[in-house]
Image (spheres, grey):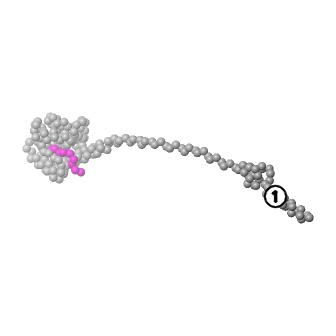
Amino acid sequence: MPIVMPVVVSQAAGANQAHRDLEEKLVTRLMLDEAADVRLIGPMQQLQGNSTDQVMLERITSDFILLGWHAPEESLRNLQALGIAARRAAHAGDRNPPLRSCRGVYFIDLTKLKSIDDAIAQIKACSANRANKTIQIGLSAPSPKKTASPVTPSSPPPTSQPAPPAAESPSTAERYVALGWNDHRDEPHDAVDDAMESLIDELDQMDL
């Protein structure tokens, strides 16, 4: 995993060649192999106000990793003496720092490391810890409230249409006309009478 925070290496006080060799090898490996943003400063307890090293530290506005030859508590006091606001950020090598609301510094004590590989491993662990916190903060952002969709009024039930009036049955007069009765309804039609008279005449002639 790439190193996502600036790395600051503070040199040891005195002319200890073993310390110098380790510092140079560590900075070279961080720059060439890990492509980290690394800076080398003088001994923390010897830094002066308005020095180049102090200005460089003040320009780091994000969390960063600081490797030095002192315990985290002493390294923090050295930063505060320079007027640099910082807090100890928890990691595997510094598990119980006091909680403060300012930029975090991951202090790594070089006196407790066994090799450069051990230093690189701790630097990567601090960087991964910081990356995970950033992701969790992004995921914990409150989601926007869902607005209720407007309720559309339901269409009113269809009104019942009045049934068409039933067809009237033909009147008695109409039935009489269809059957051949006249408007008087009690008198037979003239054609019937004529037929009856003709039939009676024929019978009379047969009797004769």
Q: Residue at x 12, y 43 (%)?
A: 41
Number of residues whose C-alpha sits closer than 10 Å to that of mark 1, classed few (under 14), some (14–19) or many (20 or more): few
Q: Quadrant of residue 62?
A: top left
Q: Which element type, helix, strand or loop, lies under badge 1?
A: helix
- The segment highlighted magenta reads 1-9
Q: Residue at x 43, y 42 (%)?
A: 150
Task: Judge whether residue 130 is colored magenta.
Answer: no
The residue beneath circle 1 is 194
Pick out the residue farthest to the left: 15
Residue 20 in the image, given as x and y percentages of width and height: 10, 47
Q: Residue at x 76, y 55 (%)?
A: 180
Query: Which of 4/185 is in front?
Result: 185
86 sits to left or right of 199? left
Does any portion of residue 73 appear in the rendered image? no
Query: Which of 181/156 is in front?
Result: 181
Report the number of numbered marks: 1
Does any portion of residue 58 appear in the rendered image? yes
Q: Residue at x 22, y 37 (%)?
A: 102
Task: Judge whether residue 8 is colored magenta.
Answer: yes
Image quadrant holding the C terminus, namely: bottom right
Residue 44 in the image, given as x and y percentages of width and height: 13, 39
Query: Which of 44/94 is in front?
Result: 44
Kind of residue sitting beneath label 1: Asp
